[in-house]
Amino acid sequence: MKLTGNTIFITGGGSGIGRGLAEALHRRGNKVIIGGRRPGVLDEVIAANPGMAAIEIDVGNASNIEAVAAKLIADYPDLNVLINNAGIMLLDSAAGRIDDARMAATITTNLMGPIRVTSAFVEHLKTKPDAVIAYTTSVLGFVPLALSAVYSSTKAALHSYVLSQRFLLKDAGVRVLEIAPPWVRTDLLNSRDAEQAMPLDAFIDETMVALGTDTDEVLVENARMLRNNPGPNEHALVTGFNEQLTALLAG
């Protein structure tokens, strides 16, 4: 991906990985517009980054997505990069009764949201040079966290969708990238102070290096083992991973 001279829209850009990516790309001379549901948080980010812009968007609301996309395309006709980063992570109980509202919110935000957002922008992006669609998935799409089974499932489904979209857009001049983070110190599951999680700054630095290459899957080094696990012998790592994480989260 070209790292300078783009016009970039990032959903979920008010905090965590989204904010980290937005600020890193802003520093490299891109026009960055962040989207999110909390206007106060968005205002804080753009105040700290003069020249950055923000817009409220609810990726769980189809009509709002269409309205925001139309406004951004009109206001920023050079927009050529879309980063689908917004997401939520909630604990659930796959061994018992699933909370229907939590399940619906997770699927709507994490899977239907990025699909809808991309759908609203894709025809515009086909007309732009150096066009990119990127998705923030998770290594949990490859090695699921059993305590957050619905979240993990949405990331696995989004990975599958990325593969299909990448194939279908290969001759359209639009690159489709997948950013699959490991456990990072963000607000997801209150992980900001988790010692075992990767520091956010380190994750962003390594991710930016990978984004600047021709790779389609943007992985930091300590995500590779989990990314490479799926296959006929995957169950041992999944079991060990979940035993370790369950004990850690319980403690």
Image: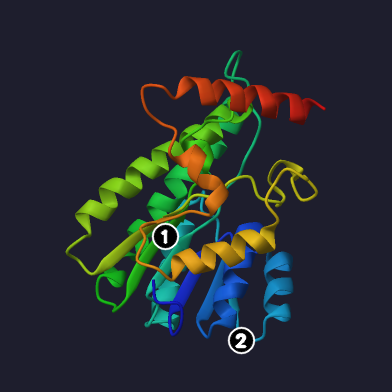
Viewer-nearest residue: 11 or 24: 24
Which of the 4 quarters of the picture holds residue 96? top right
Q: Which residue is mark 2?
A: 51
Vertical relation: 193 (above or below) 79: above
- On screen, residue 204 versus residue 39, left or right, reads left
Q: Secondary structure at mark 2?
A: loop
Q: Quadrant of residue 76?
A: bottom left
Per the image, label 1 sits on a secondary structure element best described as strand
What is the C-alpha distance between the residues marked 2 and 1? 22 Å
Residue 210 is tagged as none
> What residue is pinned by disc 1?
134
The answer, for residue 38, to whether it is visible in the render is no
- Give residue 54's position: percent from left, percent from top: 59, 73
Of all residues, the one furthest to the left in this rendering is 171
Horizontal side of 193 relative to 229 (left or right) equals right
Q: Residue 97 location in percent, x, y?
A: 60, 15
Quadrant in which residue 245 is drawn? top right
Q: What residue is at 52 percent from the left and 68 percent from the top?
A: 208
- First in residue order: circle 2 vs circle 1: 2
For the N terminus, which image quadrant?
bottom left
